[in-house]
Image: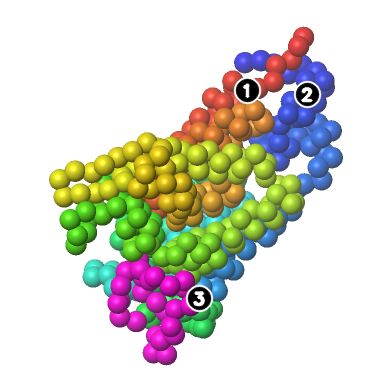
Amino acid sequence: MELITSQADIEKIAEEADPVRLAYTTPALAEAPRALHSGMDLTRYYALHWAGISVPLAAGFLVFGWRALLLVLAMIACVWAASTIWRRIGLRGHQLHSAHLFYMTALLGAAIPAHLFSWRLPWEIGSDGIGLLIPAAALMLVMFIWAFGGTGSTRVHPVALTALALMLLFPQLMLPRSVLEPGKLLFGDVLDAGPATGLVWGEPWTKLPTNPDYPAIYGWPASASLIGYTHGTEQSEMSSISLSDLLRERLQPLEDLIIAGQPAPVGLGSAIAIIVGGLVLLYNSVIDYRIPLLVIVSAYVALIVLPIPTSIGVNATAWHWLVMRDPHVGWEMGLTLANYELMAGPLLLVAFFMATWPSCRPMYRRGRAIYAIFLGISAAIFQLYVDVGYGAYLALVAASMLTPLIDRLMRPRALV
């Protein structure tokens, strides 16, 4: 291991590294002039992150109603209760910071659907006791934070691990299937949905006819249709299904994913809200803009290049690399599919709010670029061939595991 022997070496590393990460992990380096000049302490750091995540959460409260709000509040209460126990366990228990725990809870609340705040789902047989997933998720989150070393030491993001575990263990119960009608926002019950007349709707959410008897609309999330198609297993009443059929008949209008109005987890209903929340973090200089930028760009390029089916027949499925080259697809349809893939899952939330977390990302700028590009490409692969709903979480776990190696390879070296 290379030794730091002078103040000049400390200043050189501080010039390249993130002061918040230094304050977390290396107190000696945190005394470097640049870290002191930042004026950032943990309380302000978490407050600024709360300001960012509050934007997608507020959009979720609006389109998923009071259940979404009570879900987040119940999660916070359960995490507080669990943390009072785990603080008494071992030396790591003293490293559980309340502000850190509650911000992670808000982030987890954004990643799970509002219908978890209920005892039974009206559309799912065998869903009795679904509300027990809230304390289970809270306990799981606190355990992951404790197990990986507490505040500032968690190499793998605990929210990504918790959301991933919930989706793998309870895939049907975690699948959102309703959204409030435009005229019954905030105060409506997202579980009080009318009879399912179709899994998707052709008109934009804002133009759907109002049903006076039900405040919510039953629908099928875009992520479920996308993964069924890119797996090459999507069934059709016709002899075959093409990419055009998928985009035209089996997905909500793209604007529903952009502005809200789709069945989704609480914080993932509106792509614009996630981006605005991320811009709040960028404006306050608490995240490095290179990470979300490179994650999104590399994922988008990979989604365009990687092979996907252009048609699924009874006996065969036609796969193509760079699908826009197919004369039956073209650039317009290929880019539309990439847009759906980008916004139907948690990729934007991961890019702005999880991949940028100081203890998960590399410490140095050059390393962050490698990390972000790897994360974006991995997210595209996992979304296309594993699952849109949690592919970005898998990619974040894989990229975070490489962070120590990237830090060792990219660490600045003293000249003398």
Whether the residues at callouts 1 and 2 have beta carbons within 8 Å, the answer is: no
How far from the left and from the top, in percent, is residue 195? 30, 80
Q: Of callouts 1 and 3, which one flags the residue occurring earlier in the amino acid sequence?
A: 3
Residue at horizontal 32 percent and vertical 58 percent from the top: 245
User: Up-down: is 48 above or below 179?
Assistant: above
Instruction: Quarter of the image for the N terminus: give it.
Output: top right
- Where residue 393 appears, x then y in whole percent? 45, 46
Dot 2 or dot 3, earlier in sequence: 2
Say whether residue 369 is left or right of residue 332. Answer: right
Can I make out residue 93 in this image? no
Residue drawn at point x = 27 percent, y = 48 percent: 311
Q: Which residue is mark 2?
A: 12
**Dot label at residue 410:** 1
**Residue segment shown in magenta:** 194-220
Which secondary structure, mark 2?
A: helix
Mark 2 residue type: Lys
Q: Is residue 258 magenta?
A: no
The residue lying at 67 percent from left, 41 percent from top is 288
Q: Quadrant of the C terminus?
A: top right
Residue depicted at 55% across the width and 66% down the height: 259
SS at mark 3 in the image: helix
Residue 291 location, quadrant: top right
Give yes or no for contact between labels 1 and 3 (Cβ–Cβ under 8 Å): no
